[in-house]
Image (cartoon, rainbow, N blue to C red):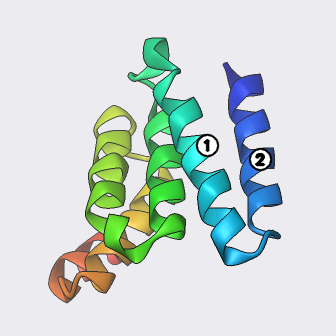
């Protein structure tokens, strides 16, 4: 499973170099690919990666990103990247008190 995630991260890296409209299309393909990994929905990296792509793809997907980061943390409360990006989501949503708790606890 790690190989699959490694390949998806590589696709994400490639997508970031594309013009904005092509980048969004590539990120949507990545999200679709993640949806097809149905047997792995108990894996924190699955939810972190899904949340990260949502967060980077479109500001309007921030609530979806937040939910995925929270799911990653339910599986592994020590997942530092999911915690960090959850804090960013909360901050971006104006929930500064909760963001501070996430960042500094």
Residue, disc 1: 30
Q: Is residue 105 visible?
A: no
Q: Position of residue 47 (x, y in %)?
A: 43, 40
Residue, disc 2: 11
Badge 2 element = helix
Disc nearer the start of the sequence (1/2) = 2
Looking at the image, residue 34 sits to the left or right of residue 87; the answer is right
Q: Position of residue 68 (x, y in %)?
A: 34, 47
Q: Position of residue 11 (x, y in %)?
A: 77, 47
Question: Is there a contact, CB below 8 Å, between mark 1 and mark 2?
Answer: yes
> Residue 72: which quarter of the image?
top left
Q: Residues within 10 Å of mark 2 (few under 14, many from 20)?
A: some
Q: Nearer the viewer, residue 35 or 96?
A: 35
Looking at the image, residue 64 sits to the left or right of residue 80; the answer is left
Q: Residue at x 48, y 46 (%)?
A: 50
Q: Nearer the viewer, residue 27 or 7?
A: 27
52 relative to 92, above or below: above
> Residue 89: which quarter of the image?
bottom left
Looking at the image, residue 78 sits to the left or right of residue 99; the answer is right
Q: Residue at x 55, y 50 (%)?
A: 28
Question: How many marks on residues?
Answer: 2
Q: Residue at x 62, y 56 (%)?
A: 25
Q: Residue at x 30, y 41 (%)?
A: 71
For the residues labelled 1 and 2, the Cα–Cα distance comes to: 7 Å
Q: Nearer the viewer, residue 12 or 2?
A: 12
- Quadrant position of the C terminus in the picture: bottom left
| Dot label at residue 57 | none
103 relative to 97, above or below: above
Badge 1 element = helix
Q: Nearer the viewer, residue 96 or 11?
A: 11
């Amino acid at each position: 499973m790690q190989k699959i995630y490694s390949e998806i991260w590589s696709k994400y890296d490639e997508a970031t170099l594309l013009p904005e409209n092509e980048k969004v299309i590539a990120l949507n393909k990545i999200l679709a690919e993640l949806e097809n990994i149905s047997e792995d929905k108990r894996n924190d990296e699955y939810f972190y990666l899904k949340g990260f792509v949502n967060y980077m793809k479109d500001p309007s997907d921030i609530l979806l990103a937040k939910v995925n980061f929270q799911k990653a943390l339910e599986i592994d409360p020590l997942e530092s990247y999911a915690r960090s990006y959850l804090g960013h989501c909360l901050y971006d949503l104006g929930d500064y008190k909760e963001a501070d708790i996430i960042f500094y606890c």
